Amino acid sequence: AELSYELDEPLYLPTCSCNITLHLQKPRLSLINKIVVSVYDADGNETILAENTLFQLLGFWKNRVLTLDGTIQDTGVGIKGVKVSLYGFSVRGVSILYGGDEPSVFQISLM
């Protein structure tokens, strides 16, 4: 599954760090074995920011908070969007919570 957030105008940033907090919900018997968070520019060129480690997703869980760290490199072309890709198997779907008391967060810290 992929979830993309596209900006109206490209965002130009110097090299900076980012912290991503994802609140995930899934059926217990579903399997997520990999999560990749990436940014892309207006031409669709994609750069991976962060990937999970396998032990972060092991087990029969229903709710999990996952934190990933990465670095956004200044390429001069700007960021047009952010994409979260989940790899695995699910019969009834996986949810990324982005509202309520515990939302998923994408935080950028300028260095």
Image (tube, rainbow, N blue to C red):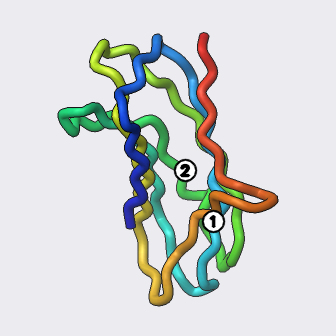
Measured as percent of width and height from the top left, residue 96 is found at 58, 64
> In which image quadrant can residue 98 be found?
bottom right
Measured as percent of width and height from the top left, residue 8 is found at 37, 37
Could you say which is closer to the camera, residue 37 or residue 55? 37
Residue type indicated by callout 2: Thr
82, above or below 91, in the image: above
Relative to 30, 9 lies left or right: left
Most extreme residue toward the left, as rendered? 43
Most extreme residue toward the front, as rendered? 8
Q: Residue at x 61, y 67 (%)?
A: 58
Relative to 50, 56 lies left or right: right
Measured as percent of width and height from the top left, residue 67 is found at 66, 46
- The mark tally for this picture is 2
Q: Residue at x 34, y 34 (%)?
A: 80
Q: Quadrant of the N terminus?
A: bottom left
Q: Residue at x 31, y 36 (%)?
A: 40
Q: Residues within 10 Å of mark 2 (few under 14, many from 20)?
A: few
Which residue does the numbered mark 1 point to in the structure image? 24
Mark 2 vs mark 1: in front: 1
- Disc 2 is placed on an element classified as loop
Which of the numbered marks, if any, corresponds to residue 109? none
Q: Quadrant of the C terminus?
A: top right
Residue type indicated by callout 1: Leu
* Precedes in sequence: disc 2 or disc 1: 1
- Disc 1 is placed on an element classified as strand
41, above or below 87, in the image: above
The answer to whether marks 2 and 1 mark residues whose Cβ atoms lie closer than 8 Å is no
Query: In whole angstroms, how far apart are the C-alphas of marks 2 and 1?
Result: 15 Å
Could you say which is closer to the camera, residue 3 or residue 27? 3
> In which image quadrant can residue 109 be found?
top right
Which residue does the numbered mark 2 point to in the structure image? 53
